[in-house]
Structures are given as structure tokens and as C-alpha cells.
Amino acid sequence: MSLFRVERTAPLAPEEAWRRLTDWPAHGRQVPLTRTRVLTPGPNRAGTRFTARTGLGRLAFDDPMEVVRWEPPAAGRSGACRLEKSGRLVRGWALVEVGDAGDGGSRVVWTEELSVRGVPRVFDPVLARAGRYLFGRAVDGLLREG
């Protein structure tokens, strides 16, 4: 399993950063060749399920996820959302944490552990670097997007 972390600060209130980071369809607009489909009715909560489909035609794969922890930020308390990935190709988890940066803005920490079927553990460092890059770009885009 490859573990990586992305940390960012944003000039957004924690509640707004949370809203943007947990807008699952918006993730599909940030990751190339990806479309995200929410499978359960809203609002978001523990039990929400969605699938990110990445690729083109027959060269695509599904990354099904479920929200297993849903604690939005509130006054004086950081928020945390944990996702479990249960796909045939990609497995693992992600933890999205959003807190107050102390200046009216927010601090975001996205931690993810994943494994890709058929990829030997010796490639975990490469997978972690790629994950940091890809998810860093996605987090940046989500925090910029209105």
C-alpha cells in the first residue's frame, strides 16, 4: 500500500473548503479523463457511495468509494471525511481533514493509502509521488473552483 499526503491552506472559511472538497462530481472535473457519479441520494453523509470512472472506452476502470466517516467542520472543530475504496483495481482509503487556519482561512490535509492491483510494492514510492501530484492538483482546483 502506498501512503501519501497533500497539505494546503486556502483563503476560504473551513465550511466552504469542506463543501468544495466533498462535491464528488466536481472531482471528475479536476482529474483528466475522469467522471464521477454519485450513487446515493443526497445530502452527503456516512453511507454516501460514488464511483469515479477514469479512462477511455475499454481502457477505463471504476474506482468505487463509500463515505464511512462524515464530520463537517463546525465552530471550534475541524472536519473529517473518510472514504473507503473498494474497486477491483484500486483499493485503500482517503481521509480529508479541513480545519481553521487561524486567519479566517482553512487548512486542508488529504491523506490517502492505496494499492493498485498488479503493481508490486516496490513501486509504492512511485505511486505515492504520482498520487501527491495528481491529488495535489485536484485539491488545488477544487479550492479555486466556486
Image: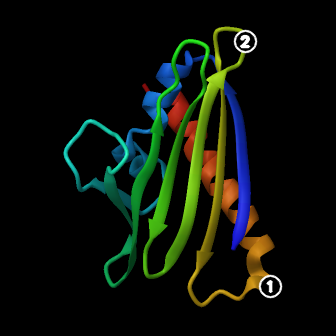
| Residue found 66% across the figure and 61% down from its top | 131
Residue 128 location (% of width, % of height): 73, 65
> Where 68 falls versus 34 (above or below)?
above
Image quadrant in which the C terminus is located: top left
Residue at the outermost top position: 103
Q: Amino acid at mark 1?
A: Val
Residue position marked by numbered label 1 in the rendering = 122
Given the image, on which type of amino acid does mark 2 rest? Answer: Gly
Is the residue marked by circle 1 packed among few (<14), some (14-19), or many (20+) residues within 10 Å?
few
Element at label 2: loop
The percent position of residue 24, horizontal first and vertical second, equals 38, 46
Circle 1: element type:
helix
Residue drawn at x 56%, y 21% is: 14
Above or below residue 10? Residue 95 is below
- Residue at 56% x, 67% y is 92
The answer to whether residue 36 shows anywhere in this view is no
Using the image, tell me which numbered label, if any, was put on residue 102: 2
| Residue 56 vs residue 115, the one in the foreground | 115
Q: Is residue 57 left or right of residue 132?
A: left
Sequence-first tag of 2 and 1: 2
Question: Which one is in front, 146 or 23?
Answer: 23
